[in-house]
């Protein structure tokens, strides 16, 4: 899982993604790559959180094998009286090792899901969840890129 990797490893991964895009597009190493990545709808390395988030969503909604690692705060009896029990947040278990434990699915999955806005996590279907999540991650990857939507019958 790519969640929680140090910057040096993310930079190396980004180099691989850039090289793959250049190879597919037939670009030289000196050519600018951002426009190509945008046209391919490829995310930058730090935003490669799509797959773990989808696995968590499917695990919570029962469309994947039920992970015993995923629990809502509202499902735990002693926490039902807390203010956080009204939200859809997941319990993040404690880990002893920051380097390995915090990157495990049991910790990184719920933490990632808790950082997403409510309109994404409460999506009624997997298709809607994936669409909203990809849009959010794409905007985080390319905040300076303005995507124009063509309106039928417009100028």
Image (tube, grey):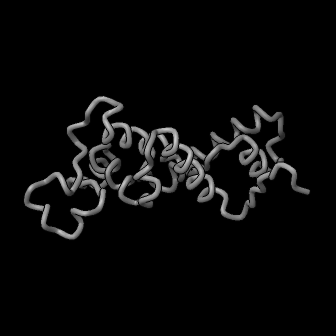
Is residue 104 positioned above or below 77 on the image? above
* Residue 96 location (% of width, % of height): 20, 54
Is residue 6 positioned above or below 126 on the image? below
The image quadrant where one finds the C terminus is: bottom right
Q: Which residue corresponds to the image point at 26% horizontal and 33% vertical from the top-left?
A: 66
* Residue 54 location (% of width, % of height): 43, 40
**Quick one: 91 or 22, which is closer to the camera?**
91
Is 43 placed left or right of 127 in the picture? right
Is residue 5 positioned above or below 69 on the image? below
Q: Residue lying farthest right?
A: 155
Q: Which residue corresponds to the image point at 52% horizontal and 53% vertical from the top-left?
A: 8
Is 83 placed left or right of 89 in the picture? left
Q: Residue lying farthest bottom?
A: 83
The number of callouts visible is 0
Q: Which residue corresponds to the image point at 76% horizontal and 32% vertical from the top-left?
A: 24
Q: Residue lying farthest top?
A: 65
Q: Quadrant of residue 85?
A: bottom left
Q: Which residue corresponds to the image point at 46% horizontal and 39% vertical from the top-left?
A: 126
* Residue 131 location (% of width, % of height): 56, 45
Is residue 140 positioned above or below 39 on the image? below
């Amino acid at each position: 899982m790519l969640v929680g990797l140090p910057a040096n490893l993310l930079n190396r991964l980004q180099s691989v993604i850039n090289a793959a895009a250049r190879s597919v597009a037939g670009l030289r190493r000196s050519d600018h790559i951002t426009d190509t990545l945008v046209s391919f709808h490829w995310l930058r390395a730090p935003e490669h959180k799509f797959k773990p988030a989808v696995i968590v969503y499917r695990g919570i909604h029962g469309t994947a094998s039920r992970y015993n690692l995923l629990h809502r705060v509202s499902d735990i009896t002693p926490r039902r009286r807390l203010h956080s029990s009204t939200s859809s947040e997941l319990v993040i278990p404690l880990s002893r090792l920051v380097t390995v434990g915090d990157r495990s699915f049991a910790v990184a999955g719920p933490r990632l899901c808790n950082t997403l806005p409510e309109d994404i996590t409460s999506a009624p279907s997997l298709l809607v969840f994936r669409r909203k999540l990809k849009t959010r991650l794409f905007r985080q990857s390319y905040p300076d890129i303005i995507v124009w939507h063509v309106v039928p019958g417009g100028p």
